[in-house]
Image (spheres, rainbow, N blue to C red):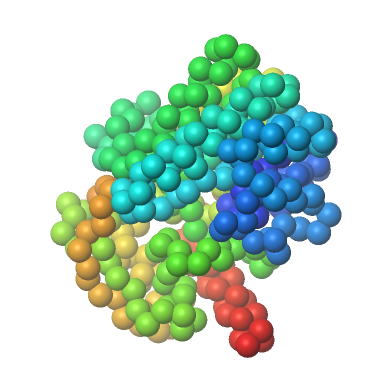
Amino acid sequence: MDTHVLVTGGAGYIGSHAVLALREAGCKVVVLDDLSTGRVEAVPDGVPLAVGDVGDAETVSRVLAEHRIEAVMHFAGSILVPESVSNPLKYYRNNTAASRTLIEACVENGVRAFVFSSTAAVYGIPETVPAAEDAPTVPINPYGWSKLMTEQVLRDVVAAHGMQHVILRYFNVAGADPKGRTGQATPEATHLIKVAAEVVTGKRPGIQIYGEDYPTPDGTCVRDYIHVSDLADAHVCALKHLIDGGESLTLNCGYGRGYSVREVLAAVEAEAGRDLNAQGAPRRAGDPPELVADAGKIRAAFEWTPRFEDLSIIVKTALAWETKLSDKEEQAD
């Protein structure tokens, strides 16, 4: 697939995995990242890195023109649900306003395909579980609203300008590249498996379970965990669909199987062979009790077959990456 692709947020967790998958698919990749949470070392050798803000129209237009970009994968943005509740304006600036600027630059520069990193948070508290793409979208936090607003911008742009898109609504992304090339290295991360892996490697003394009184089988939140490399493969499938002339789509990215917080922590403890010292804590603002994907549509739309669907594989790769990070930090000291 000989396509010039711009990956915004390509120095970050999910974006860096997408860069690897795109290169393996034969694409010519350029990364745009402000490095606020991304890392230069996550960008592979030979991939141009433009350091800048996707909300800066001049920077975006220059990069699009210089590299003759045909397609964009948009990962850049803020992603912490509790922070979005306490600082909503940051999320409407970084996610909604910046995305609008990026999309406008894409239209002006003739970009014909756009793959957008959205979220299951657009569903809020789903009326039925698993949640399908046609479920009501009533977010319960500013993070979900900021992404849903960008989805609407894209739909309106298709009607007015013809730029086709695929919106991918992620469920809970976890794990790391099985070859150890990249993984999650965000400081003060809040993702459950990442935090648990930090406990295993000694970066944290223990882990908190936020809410033990949810209406779920064991009282803790239930989530659908998808391996980041499978998610990256889904993005490549989405791009191929658009390049081949496919119409705009909105698709869930998950496996259709939920695990509770306690089940996930048990899986980490089994893999690590140690106790995580988990302690109960009050619920966090903006957390729905259960989010599980109806993932039938993406499997039908693309030739997408997950390779790392087992929770134990997700945990194993996350722990391997965290161990690698710890070893690097010890050597640096």
Foreground: 50 or 150?
50
* Front-lying residue, 192 or 74: 74
Q: Is residue 265 above or below residue 230?
A: below
Residue 55: x and y, percent?
58, 38
Q: Give the position of the N terminus as an image quadrant.
A: top right
Seen in the picture, residue 54 relative to 82 is either above or below; the reply is: above
Q: Which residue is located at x 75 percent, y 38 percent? A: 63
Q: For the C terminus, which image quadrant? A: bottom right
Residue displayed at 51% across by 17% down: 156
Residue 30 rendering spot, x and y as whole percentages:
75, 44
Q: Is residue 311 left or right of residue 22?
A: left
Residue 206 in the image, given as x and y percentages of width and height: 35, 79
The residue that appears at 18% across and 55% down in the rendered structure is 214
| Residue 31 seen in this snapshot | yes
Q: Is residue 18 visible?
A: no
Residue 158, relative to residue 138: is it above or below?
Answer: above
Q: Position of residue 271 (x, y in %)?
A: 46, 76
Residue closer to the observer: 194 or 53? 53
- Whether residue 308 sits left or right of residue 188 in the image: it is right
Asked if residue 87 lies left or right of residue 94, the reply is left
Eyeballing the image, is 300 above or below 43? above
The one nearer the camera, 223 or 6, is: 6
**Residue 160 position by quadrant:** top right
